[in-house]
Image (cartoon, rainbow, N blue to C red):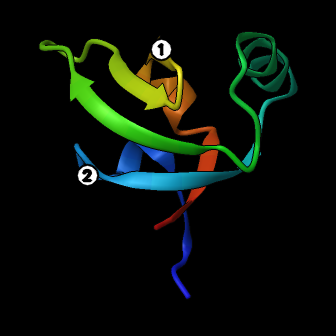
Amino acid sequence: MSTLRNLAELPLGSEGTIVEVRDKELMNRLCEMGLKPGHVVKLENKAPFNGSYTVSSKHLKLAIRRENLQKIFIQSI
Protein backbone atom coordinates (compact mmCIF):
# COMPACT_ATOMS: atom_id res chain seq x y z
CA MET A 1 0.00 0.00 0.00
CA SER A 2 1.38 3.42 -0.92
CA THR A 3 1.78 6.26 1.52
CA LEU A 4 -0.19 9.48 1.75
CA ARG A 5 1.57 12.54 0.30
CA ASN A 6 0.65 15.95 -0.98
CA LEU A 7 -0.09 16.49 -4.65
CA ALA A 8 2.97 18.73 -5.09
CA GLU A 9 5.19 15.68 -4.41
CA LEU A 10 3.67 13.66 -7.25
CA PRO A 11 5.98 13.38 -10.30
CA LEU A 12 4.71 15.02 -13.50
CA GLY A 13 2.62 12.59 -15.53
CA SER A 14 1.71 10.49 -12.49
CA GLU A 15 -1.73 9.82 -11.04
CA GLY A 16 -3.13 9.64 -7.55
CA THR A 17 -6.45 9.46 -5.75
CA ILE A 18 -7.45 12.45 -3.63
CA VAL A 19 -7.82 11.36 -0.02
CA GLU A 20 -8.24 14.69 1.78
CA VAL A 21 -7.86 18.45 1.43
CA ARG A 22 -6.44 20.16 4.52
CA ASP A 23 -7.97 23.57 3.89
CA LYS A 24 -11.74 23.98 4.16
CA GLU A 25 -11.96 26.97 1.79
CA LEU A 26 -9.84 25.20 -0.85
CA MET A 27 -11.94 22.05 -0.42
CA ASN A 28 -15.11 24.04 -1.07
CA ARG A 29 -13.65 25.68 -4.20
CA LEU A 30 -12.43 22.36 -5.59
CA CYS A 31 -15.80 20.71 -4.94
CA GLU A 32 -17.59 23.55 -6.74
CA MET A 33 -15.37 22.85 -9.76
CA GLY A 34 -16.04 19.12 -9.58
CA LEU A 35 -12.85 17.84 -7.92
CA LYS A 36 -13.58 15.83 -4.76
CA PRO A 37 -11.94 13.22 -2.52
CA GLY A 38 -12.02 9.86 -4.24
CA HIS A 39 -11.32 11.33 -7.69
CA VAL A 40 -8.22 10.24 -9.58
CA VAL A 41 -6.05 13.18 -10.64
CA LYS A 42 -3.05 13.45 -12.91
CA LEU A 43 -0.33 16.07 -12.55
CA GLU A 44 -0.03 17.17 -16.18
CA ASN A 45 2.31 20.13 -16.44
CA LYS A 46 4.18 22.84 -14.54
CA ALA A 47 4.37 26.45 -15.66
CA PRO A 48 7.85 28.01 -15.59
CA PHE A 49 9.13 30.40 -12.89
CA ASN A 50 7.26 28.74 -10.00
CA GLY A 51 3.96 29.08 -11.84
CA SER A 52 0.86 26.97 -11.42
CA TYR A 53 0.49 23.27 -12.16
CA THR A 54 -2.06 21.73 -14.50
CA VAL A 55 -4.09 18.97 -12.86
CA SER A 56 -6.59 16.85 -14.78
CA SER A 57 -9.37 14.53 -13.69
CA LYS A 58 -11.78 12.87 -16.11
CA HIS A 59 -13.55 15.77 -17.79
CA LEU A 60 -11.70 18.76 -16.33
CA LYS A 61 -8.33 20.48 -16.21
CA LEU A 62 -7.42 22.99 -13.53
CA ALA A 63 -4.45 25.28 -12.93
CA ILE A 64 -3.55 25.13 -9.24
CA ARG A 65 -0.82 27.01 -7.36
CA ARG A 66 1.89 24.97 -5.67
CA GLU A 67 0.90 26.21 -2.19
CA ASN A 68 -2.58 24.79 -2.77
CA LEU A 69 -1.23 21.50 -4.13
CA GLN A 70 0.58 21.08 -0.81
CA LYS A 71 -2.81 21.03 0.96
CA ILE A 72 -4.24 18.26 -1.25
CA PHE A 73 -3.28 14.80 -0.06
CA ILE A 74 -3.32 11.84 -2.41
CA GLN A 75 -2.56 8.15 -2.50
CA SER A 76 -0.46 7.14 -5.50
CA ILE A 77 -1.90 4.66 -7.96
N-term-proximal mark, 2 vs 1: 2
Q: Quadrant of residue 36?
A: top right
- Which residue shows up at 76% across the image and 44% down it? 37
Residue 5: x %, y % from top left: 53, 61
Q: Residues within 10 Å of mark 2 (few under 14, many from 20)?
A: few
Residue 40: x %, y % from top left: 56, 47
Q: Residues within 10 Å of mark 1 (few under 14, many from 20)?
A: some
User: Going by the image, does 65 lie left or right of 22?
Assistant: left
Q: CA distance from mark 2 to mark 1?
A: 17 Å
Name the quarter where the N terminus is drawn.
Answer: bottom right
User: Going by the image, does 71 lie left or right of 36?
Assistant: left
User: Going by the image, does 17 lie left or right of 25?
Assistant: left
Looking at this rendering, what residue extends furthest in the front direction?
Answer: 59
Residue 22: x %, y % from top left: 76, 41
Residue 16: x %, y % from top left: 49, 55
- Which residue shows up at 73% across the image and 50% down it? 38
| Residue at numbered disc 2 | 11
The answer to whether residue 65 is above or below residue 6 is above
- Which residue shows up at 46% across the image and 67% down it? 77
Q: In terms of secondary structure, where does tag 2 sit?
A: loop
The answer to whether residue 41 is above or below residue 47 is below
Observer able to see residue 64: no
**Residue type (three-letter) at the residue carrying disc 1:** Leu
| Residue at numbered disc 1 | 62
**Residue type (three-letter) at the residue carrying disc 2:** Pro
- Which residue shows up at 51% across the image and 32% down it? 57
Q: In terms of secondary structure, where does tag 1 sit?
A: strand
Tally of numbered discs: 2
